[in-house]
Amino acid sequence: MPGRAARTTALAAVIAATVVSMPSAHAQPADDALKTYTDLTREAEKLSQDHLKAQSDLSRANAVVVAATEAEKKALAESEQYRGQVDLLTTASFEGARLTNLSAFLTSTSQQDFLERMQAMNIIASDQNAAVERMNATLTAAQKARTDATTAASLAEKFATDVSTRKVAMDQQVTAARTKYQSLTAPQQKTLAATGPKVSAPVPAGAAGVALNFALGEQGKPYVFGSNGPGSWDCSSLMQAAYRAAGVSIPRVTYDQAKVGRGVGRGEVAPGDLIIYYSGQSHVAMAVDGTRAVHASTEGVPVKVANIDSIGPISVIRRVVG
């Protein structure tokens, strides 16, 4: 489609311009090269979260299509059932069950017989009207379900395009980051890969404590863009897995994790809280206590504990439970 091609071409142009504009690794001082790598990985992480979000949106849209299609089938089946009932009542009416007040009076053999005939006539009429109403209601429901399915299918197509577009952007940025990593000096790579002593800390009772204990247990494992564990993680998959271990379901991506539970201030942060970073909310860590957090940082850097405020500018802090 022209719109899709235009969007993809424009996005590719922006990415190409960004990568081309990066200074040569050989011309950069060591510190500048490390900063460039950090900037590239931060953008790659954001694009990875964008891609994961688009996949999630597509999955939900496809589920709506399936549900709406099934609802339409069910409603049509029910309408056919009621249509059969209407037909039977109509046939019964024309085969002698249709009575007028006068005919019921003239053919009755007694007052009681008249009352019984009148009652039968009213029951048939009532049943027929009710069956017609139910049939019409199911047909209306089927029509709505068809409209919902059509709308959802259109949305799913849009999300599918979004998934493809964002994957192209993510792949190019991840490649740029990995290429830059290879250009770093051995001491720089060693510094990034250093885990230091593993941190242990008391954890609170309940789900937050279980989640924190899980996250702390993953220290030293590598970060891989888009990874879902258990051998490697990205920032948000580690948080999701930690709370899953505690029996609590949270979304996959940082943008949605920034909405779970309730918000708390920096001075209220407690073990197990999710700390979302940057204005674009593209990174997440879990509070160990009031000053430290455990997180999967970026490729080349293992899961580790760091000072909460050193990770980046805080966007929001969310308490998942409690």
Image (spheres, helix red, strand yellow):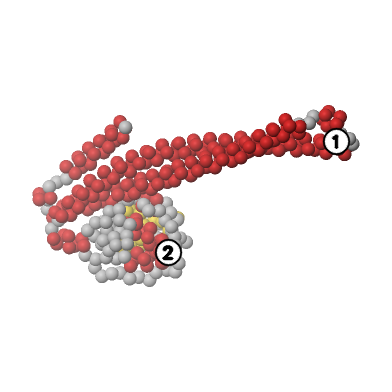
Q: Is residue 154 left or right of residue 1?
A: right
Residue 75, position as x, y percentages in the image: 56, 40
Q: How many marks are shown on the rendered structure?
A: 2
Q: Is residue 29 left or right of residue 15?
A: left
The three-letter code of the residue at mark 1 reads Phe
Residue 289, can we see it? Answer: no
Residue 236, position as x, y percentages in the image: 34, 55
Taking the view exactly as shown, the residue that stands out farthest to the top is: 102
Taking the view exactly as shown, the residue that stands out farthest to the right is: 110
Residue 203, position as x, y percentages in the image: 39, 69
Whether residues under marks 2 and 1 lie with C-beta atoms below 8 angstroms apart, the answer is: no
Q: For the residues marked 2 and 1, what is the alpha-carbon distance in whole angstroms? A: 72 Å
Seen from the viewer's position, the closer of residues 90 and 78 is: 90
Residue lying at 22% horizontally and 37% vertically, measured from the top left = 13
Q: To which residue does mark 1 refer?
A: 114
Residue 233, can we see it? Answer: yes
Residue lying at 86% horizontally and 34% vertically, measured from the top left = 108
Q: Which of marks 2 and 1 is nearer the N terminus?
A: 1
Q: To which residue does mark 2 refer?
A: 246
Q: Is residue 50 left or right of residue 205?
A: left
Residue lying at 36% horizontally and 47% vertically, measured from the top left = 55
Q: What element carries label 2?
A: loop
